[in-house]
């Protein structure tokens, strides 16, 4: 008979607690949690690409155990303000993540961001004949076609694209 013991759920919870504390708690700031594993670097790029966010101290955790996702990534930002435009880009890169505002080491506010229904001037249309690619004053507008597969439809040429096929327009572009 084997002497191996199976950890009970209390042991697993304690193990999960120790694992999640590999990134230290923050006194004040923003936590972007429940990022699907592998998408954390994309969320990081979206956050770092905005003016005013490039000097923000960010802790990144990749491939954490998650009961909800199996594996997840997490970002902790030492800032109390995350512009709406940044949140919108995060929603494009990793919809359904949770954003938590931390005050005095406690969650002050928490919400889940969803894939946007309308995306204005944040994506470049890949259709070379689309008016947005040759008229400077025409901004891009995409509408959600299928949020589960992350497909969007250009509001001008009406072509449908997977989000990963399109380039993000940064605030500095």
Image (spheres, rainbow, N blue to C red):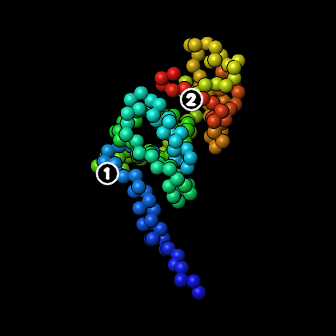
Q: State the residue position of label 2.
A: 168
Q: Return the residue found at the far left.
A: 104
The mark that comes first in sequence, 2 or 1, is 1
Q: State the residue position of label 1.
A: 105
Q: Is residue 24 above or below residue 82?
A: below
Q: Residue 118 or 51: which is nearer the viewer?
A: 51
Q: Secondary structure at mark 2?
A: strand
Q: Are marks 2 and 1 in contact (CB under 8 Å)?
A: no
At horizontal 53% and vertical 83% (from top left) the residue drawn is: 3
Q: Position of residue 65 (x, y in %)?
A: 51, 58
The reply to whether residue 34 is in sight is: no
Q: Position of residue 53 (x, y in %)?
A: 40, 32
At horizontal 58% and vertical 34% (from top left) the residue drawn is: 117
Please state if 161 lies on the left or on the right of 55 as rendered.
Answer: right
Q: Secondary structure at mark 1?
A: loop
Q: Position of residue 77 (x, y in %)?
A: 39, 42
Please state if 60 lies on the left or on the right of 4 as rendered.
Answer: left
Q: Is residue 152 above or below residue 34?
A: above
Q: Is residue 3 above or below residue 143?
A: below
Q: Return the residue found at the far bottom.
A: 1
10 Å crowding of disc 2: few (<14), some (14-19), many (20+): some
10 Å crowding of disc 1: few (<14), some (14-19), many (20+): few
At horizontal 45% and vertical 34% (from top left) the residue drawn is: 48
At horizontal 57% and vertical 19% (from top left) the residue drawn is: 139
Quarter of the picture containing the N terminus is bottom right
Q: Is residue 128 above or below residue 19?
A: above
The reply to whether residue 73 is in sight is: yes
Q: Position of residue 87 (x, y in %)?
A: 47, 36
Q: How many marks?
A: 2
The tag on residue 159 is none
């Amino acid at each position: 008979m084997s002497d191996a013991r199976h950890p009970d759920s209390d042991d697993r919870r304690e193990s999960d607690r120790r694992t999640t504390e590999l990134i230290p708690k923050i006194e004040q700031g923003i936590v972007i949690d429940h990022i699907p594993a592998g998408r954390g670097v994309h969320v990081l790029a979206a956050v770092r690409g905005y003016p005013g966010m490039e000097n923000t101290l960010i802790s990144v955790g990749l491939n954490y155990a998650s009961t909800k996702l199996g594996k997840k990534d997490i970002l902790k930002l030492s800032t109390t303000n995350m512009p709406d435009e940044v949140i919108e880009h995060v929603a494009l890169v990793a919809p359904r993540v949770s954003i938590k505002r931390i005050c005095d080491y406690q969650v002050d506010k928490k919400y889940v961001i969803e894939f946007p229904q309308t995306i204005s001037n944040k994506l470049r249309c890949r259709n070379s004949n689309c008016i947005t690619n040759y008229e400077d004053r025409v901004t891009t507008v995409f509408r959600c076609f299928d949020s589960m597969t992350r497909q969007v439809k250009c509001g001008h040429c009406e072509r449908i694209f997977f989000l990963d096929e399109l380039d993000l327009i940064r605030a500095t572009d």
